[in-house]
Amino acid sequence: MSKILSYILRSIIAMAALVMLVWVNLNFVTAGTYIGSALFGAIFLAALLWKPICRLIKYLWRGLAGKIAVIAVGGFIAVCAVMCAVFSVNMAVYMEKPIDDTRAVIVLGCQVKGENPSSMLAYRLIAAEEVLNAHPEAVCVVSGGQGNGEDISEAEAMYRFLVDRGVDESRIIKEDKSVSTRENFRFSTALLAERGITDGVVVVTNNFHQFRADIYAKENGLKTVGHHSSKTPLRNILNYWIREWAAIMALPFGI
């Protein structure tokens, strides 16, 4: 590769990484912010410092310990890249699943600002309303406890939002103890089981979240009949997408 072509390629990579670095920081701070900043910051620096990095690799390659270190780091990067690619394919596939006969809807909680749903949560609730209007016999579990900076539980905020938009309050079941997606499903499944519902469930959450949600549903023996994904603002999607990679990787550890 000529020096000019190499320079152009590294410049493109550096600019792309810089754009992604800014994009991942447009949302409020999540795990995706830290991971994305580290990832794209590393790519940006690698593009700028490519020649010194190549010289360092050549130097390390002279000794056995250096070879092992280079192979270990390269292998780790390759494995992570493959895993994230596989996760992304599954996340894309699970974004929307055709809805069949619906007995219940589970709406997964998200941040509440004071007593009002955040924009992300409001989008989920609007999507849930669409399913409930299309299936008037279905009940709805609004699932989410009270977190830091929230004056009421996410379940209560969701309940108020749906009732204000005309959903019959008798159809809404509040699950206000959970503090994670795994608990959302554990507690919501128990509430539905009390009503004899273990199948015919539609999960409503953001598109990037549906793959992991489906894993938790199966973990709790819940038979879903479809997914209905809510809108995710473009400025937020990269942050949450990267955060989801980390969350999926943590699944085997029960996190």
Image (spheres, grey):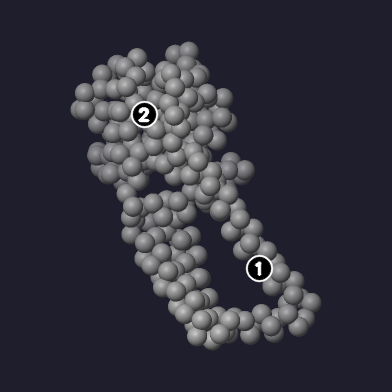
Whole-percent x, y for residue 194 in the image: 47, 15
Q: Quadrant of the N terminus?
A: bottom right
Residue toward you, 46 or 65: 46
Sequence-wise first label, 2 or 1: 1
Extreme-right residue of the structure: 64
Residue 142's disc is 2
Residue toward you, 50 or 39: 50
Q: Is residue 249 above or below residue 54?
A: above
Residue visible at 76% across and 83% down in the picture: 62
Query: Mark 1 packing: few (<14 Cα in 10 Å), some, or many (20+)?
Result: few
Whole-percent x, y for residue 130 in the image: 30, 28
Residue visible at 53% across and 76% down in the picture: 46
Query: Mark 2 packing: few (<14 Cα in 10 Å), some, or many (20+)?
Result: many
Q: In this view, does 250 lie to the left or right of 116?
A: right
How many numbered marks does the figure carry? 2
Whole-percent x, y for residue 28 in the image: 34, 55
Query: Quick one: SS at disc 2?
Result: strand
Residue toward you, 97 or 84: 97
Q: Can residue 143 be seen in this view?
A: no
Three-letter residue code for mark 2: Val
Q: Can residue 117 be seen in this view?
A: yes
Is the residue under label 1 in contact with that under label 2 (CB below 8 Å)?
A: no
| Figure quadrant of residue 72 | bottom right
Residue visible at 79% across and 77% down in the picture: 64
Q: In this view, does 6 lie above or below 19?
A: below
Q: Mark 1 points at which residue?
A: 73
Query: Quick one: SS at disc 1?
Result: helix
Three-letter residue code for mark 1: Val
Residue visible at 41% across and 73% down in the picture: 15
